[in-house]
Image (cartoon, coloured by chain):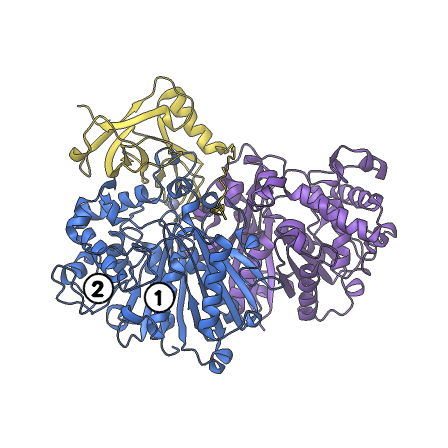
């Protein structure tokens, strides 16, 4: 199979509300920035795949007016109505066919123009979930009650994740929700839906993110520091929460298994040097450790207690601050990719992890309670 | 690039209101029909691509999640494509890439929508820019009305041309049991007397709002060889977009379509589309558009689309349309009845690909074009800006 | 057994607040305060986009460096009279709207067309903006377009 690399990227500023910039301008600025960083011109981009959401934008067929700002005019283009890490799968497959040599993935979300609860609340089906008011928050609360209850995990471990991520965010200019907090601060913060509290929860974030991919042979011409895609897995699960195994998390586990198999990873906890996962809520991060095979089942709490996933730990997770630091819906997956790519090429500046990095993991998710998951393995070595 | 074939397709009959099935049920019907047609089991599917119309129409965000079970995508790779009217075709094209990339060998592409569940033109009006344009939007009809009027004034097309297309596709639909509209006795008079909805578009120049779904199975050459089902080889694929508000835009000159057609023809080795293509399924949501697409696809020169109607070249041979069609059968367009006879939005552009593949697989029944070897499927979406072209062949290119 | 229940009724109400951004803010400031229409000139092809967008689609070049006043009148390109009603329609049919190519602009501007019977409209007909007395900084700062008064 052809080898494909990330050769360029850019993000917009991330803020709770970018009120003074039109959506098109936000996208245009970010695309221009990605091209500038890469020394490419728009003519060098052969295909564009975009990720955005009609409900967030309040614009049906949300890429209609984004074609010009994305520079997709008269190009082969398609929209994946998912997080950007899914759109990247499509771009990756397009490159694998050999039909294209370069591809750009563009994701954007100005959720401050509507609201995160509208976005997630409308995923609920009208018959069983909407009458219950199922949203990202309330579904996660149910999930936590199931998973944490099953393994008897204390909520203080989730609070420790929040402390870690909000602390990591302090060093990351791409994060806006940050600070020095203690476990007590988190536990004592306002309860939103038991057991989830304010400081366990993501902020409202507007923003856009762009990455540029190229095939082997082109990638090396574009940049001295390509970040190679070593594997990807993505898997969907069933819809109704009551029908799903919320403890075993089969779609997460299988997505990871496939990505590891493609990348030749046998022991993820040993072989992965850094990971950016889409935790959304602090509680979720421990479940992700489990599903991604970073620990034994139900033992995610040990990793945070032992400091393994802290920035100076053996397997730093969310050194960017994660979604708790900034949560641009539809763009977060690309932000995770960009963070790992930046770390693997030693370009993360103040929040660069101080150890040798070779292999990174990127996770993103879609739907309630990790219904669908995508796992990417990236490396600074072609392999 | 790996060769890819369509080995199974299915779509339930379209109608105004599917009372007995919800969205998930329709998606399930389409998927099972496609599997049966291919001679495959749900467990054979390796990955699923889901497509549907804007969620502000359906009121359901991420409908692919709700339809996970119905689309056989539990425990499998799946995501959703959404490109407006083009979405059905874009979903098929994504499934093509799933296979062509080498990542998967058997992929299900499935789409569906229930237009009866909301006021469709309200939803489609939210495609217009919310700051400048949505104020006087009337969904798809008003956007296409402007395009049609410009075309009429520029090239001298008349209401008669629109009406002839409306009659052609509705009469064709009478031979397609799955089409939504079966208007017995449809004629030019009826089109002319139907109420104006957005001038120059009359009710019978417009597509209906349907409930429906559609599914296709795309497989690698290796798998195709093992299956007994007839194949439609995907010999050319392109999806090109233009903008909405760009300088000197001419709605009668579909530049994205021209580019997509050129790309697909090159891949498929088509040099003279009018001669070499045996049958085409175009996305004529409104009658007048069919002529503009003839031109964009290079079936004729610019401004000459109406000639193909006057001469009857794009009509089916052996059918009495109530007026002269001396060159009928040269390049039949929309033997299925086209979008003018069924439109649930999500599946519509996929049904173009399904119908085109049915023609080269000899499965179109009463509306079969005899001996069709090369078929073209087209879709448009967004602000009349996304265009898809797929060339399907009885043999691989 | 009685007839089974077959559906549930619902409604989706989503409030939005769409950012104008700099160029549209400025555009509507000109319409609101001065009753003037401004476009943005592409920095590459030099053509003028009205309403202004930050990027010229054909050139992928920014537009904002140069603002140009265009006329509040121009040529009618295409129009439609809408008769079709649907729930939540922003303007009640029948009404006519179309695209006017303003003098000095290279993109067409959409708006309502009034003070003329639709049958009398012709392509290329000269049209002019009728300004609203009560202007709020949105599209209805211009009430509608009508045939140019000599
Ligand atoms: Zn320009």
**Kind of element beneath mark 2:** loop
**Kind of element beneath mark 1:** helix
Q: Is residue A152 left or right of residue C36?
A: right
Where in the figure is residue A246, as x and y percent of width and height? 71, 54
Shown colour of chain C: yellow
Q: Is residue C17 visible?
A: yes
Residue displayed at 69% across by 61% down: A250
Q: Residue furthest toward the front?
A: C1
Shown colour of chain A: purple
Q: Is residue A69 above or below residue B40?
A: above
* Mark 2 lies on residue: B314
| Residue toward you, B370 or A67 | B370
Q: Chain of mark 1?
A: B
Q: Is residue B17 left or right of residue A55?
A: left
| Residue toward you, B141 or A162 | B141
Q: Is residue A192 above or below residue B341?
A: above
Question: Separation of disc 1 and disc 2 at Cα?
Answer: 16 Å
Local crowd size for mark 1, using a 10 Å CA cut-off: few (<14), some (14–19), many (≥20): many
Q: Chain of mark 2?
A: B
């Amino acid at each position: 199979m052809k080898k494909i690399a990330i050769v360029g990227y850019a993000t917009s500023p991330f803020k709770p509300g970018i009120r003074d910039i039109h959506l098109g301008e936000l996208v245009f600025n970010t695309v221009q920035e990605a091209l500038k960083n890469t020394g490419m011109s728009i003519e060098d981009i052969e295909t564009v795949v975009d990720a955005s959401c009609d409900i967030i934008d309040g614009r049906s067929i949300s890429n209609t007016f984004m074609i010009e700002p994305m520079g997709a005019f008269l190009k082969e283009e398609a929209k994946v109505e998912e997080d950007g890490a899914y759109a990247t799968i499509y771009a990756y497959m397009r490159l694998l066919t050999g039909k294209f040599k370069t591809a750009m993935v563009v994701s954007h979300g100005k959720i401050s123009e509507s609201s995160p609860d509208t976005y997630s609340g409308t995923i609920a089906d009208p018959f069983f979930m909407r009458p219950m008011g199922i949203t990202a928050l309330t579904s996660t609360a149910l999930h936590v009650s199931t998973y944490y209850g099953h393994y008897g995990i204390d909520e203080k471990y989730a609070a420790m994740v929040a402390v870690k991520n909000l602390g990591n965010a302090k060093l990351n200019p791409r994060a806006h929700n940050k600070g020095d907090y203690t476990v007590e601060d988190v536990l004592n913060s306002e309860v939103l839906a038991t057991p989830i509290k304010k400081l366990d929860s993501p902020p409202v974030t507007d923003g856009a993110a762009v990455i540029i991919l190229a095939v082997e042979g082109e990638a090396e011409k574009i940049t001295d520091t390509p970040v190679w895609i070593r594997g990807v897995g993505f898997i969907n699960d069933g819809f109704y929460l009551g029908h799903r195994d919320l403890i075993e998390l089969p779609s997460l586990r299988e997505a990871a298994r496939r990505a590891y198999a493609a990348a030749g990873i046998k022991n993820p906890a040993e072989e992965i040097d850094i990971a950016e996962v889409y935790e959304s809520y602090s509680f979720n991060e421990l479940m992700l450790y489990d599903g991604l095979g970073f620990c034994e089942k139900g033992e995610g709490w040990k990793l945070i207690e032992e400091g393994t996933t802290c920035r100076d730990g053996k397997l730093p997770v969310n050194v960017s601050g994660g979604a708790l630091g900034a949560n641009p819906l539809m763009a977060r997956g690309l932000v995770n990719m960009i963070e790992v790519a930046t770390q693997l090429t030693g370009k993360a500046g103040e929040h660069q992890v101080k150890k040798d990095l070779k292999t990174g993991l990127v996770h993103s998710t879609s739907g309630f309670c990790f219904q669908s998951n995508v796992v990417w393995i990236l490396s600074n070595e072609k392999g | 690039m790996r060769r890819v074939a369509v080995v199974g397709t299915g779509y339930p009959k379209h109608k105004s209101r599917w009372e007995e099935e919800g969205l998930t049920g329709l998606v399930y019907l389409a998927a099972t029909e496609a599997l049966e047609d291919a001679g495959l089991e749900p467990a054979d599917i390796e990955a699923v691509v889901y497509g549907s119309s804007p969620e502000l129409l359906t009121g359901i965000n991420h409908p692919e999640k709700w339809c996970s079970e119905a689309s056989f995508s539990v425990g499998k790779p799946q995501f959703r494509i959404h490109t407006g009217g083009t979405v059905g075709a874009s979903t098929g094209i994504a499934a093509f890439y799933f296979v062509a990339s080498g990542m998967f060998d058997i992929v299900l592409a499935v789409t569906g929508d229930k237009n009866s569940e909301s006021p469709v033109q309200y939803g489609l009006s939210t495609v217009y820019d919310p700051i400048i344009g949505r104020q006087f939007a009337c969904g798809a009809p008003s956007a296409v009305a402007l395009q049609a009027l410009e075309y009429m004034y520029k090239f001298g097309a008349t209401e008669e041309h629109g009406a002839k297309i409306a009659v052609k596709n509705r009469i064709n639909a009478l031979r397609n049991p799955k089409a939504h509209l079966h208007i017995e006795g449809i004629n030019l008079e009826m089109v002319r007397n139907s109420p104006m909805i957005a001038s120059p578009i009359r009710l019978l120049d417009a597509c209906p709002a349907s409930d429906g779904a559609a599914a296709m199975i795309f497989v690698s050459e290796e798998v195709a060889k093992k299956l007994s089902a007839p194949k439609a080889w995907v010999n050319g694929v392109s999806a090109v977009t233009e903008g909405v508000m760009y300088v000197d835009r001419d709605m009668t000159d579909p530049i994205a379509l021209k580019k997509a057609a050129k790309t697909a023809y090159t891949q498929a080795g088509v040099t003279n589309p009018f001669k070499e293509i045996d049958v085409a399924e175009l996305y004529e949501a409104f009658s007048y558009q069919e002529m503009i697409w003839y031109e964009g696809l290079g079936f004729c020169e610019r401004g000459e689309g109406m000639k193909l109607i006057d001469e009857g070249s794009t009509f089916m041979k052996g059918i009495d349309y109530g007026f002269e069609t001396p060159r009928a059968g040269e390049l039949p367009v929309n033997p299925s009845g086209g979008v003018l006879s069924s439109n649930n939005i999500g599946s519509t552009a996929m049904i173009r690909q399904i119908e085109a593949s049915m023609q080269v697989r000899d499965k179109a029944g009463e509306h079969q074009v005899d001996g069709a070897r090369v078929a073209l499927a087209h879709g448009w979406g967004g602000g009349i800006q996304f265009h898809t072209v797929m060339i399907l062949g009885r043999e691989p290119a | 057994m009685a007839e089974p229940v077959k559906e549930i009724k619902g409604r989706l109400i989503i409030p939005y607040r769409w950012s104008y951004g700099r160029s549209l803010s400025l555009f509507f400031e000109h319409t609101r305060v001065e009753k003037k229409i401004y476009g943005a000139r592409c920095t590459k092809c030099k053509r003028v986009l009205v309403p202004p967008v930050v990027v010229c689609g054909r050139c992928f070049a920014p537009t904002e460096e140069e603002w140009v006043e265009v006329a509040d009148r121009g040529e009618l390109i295409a129009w439609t009279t809408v008769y079709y009603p649907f729930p939540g329609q922003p303007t009640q049919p029948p009404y006519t709207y179309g695209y006017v190519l303003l003098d000095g602009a290279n993109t067409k501007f959409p708006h309502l067309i009034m003070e003329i019977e639709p049958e009398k409209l012709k392509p290329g007909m000269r049209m002019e903006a009728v300004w609203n007395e009560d202007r709020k900084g949105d599209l209805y700062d211009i009430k509608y377009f009508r045939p140019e008064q000599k």
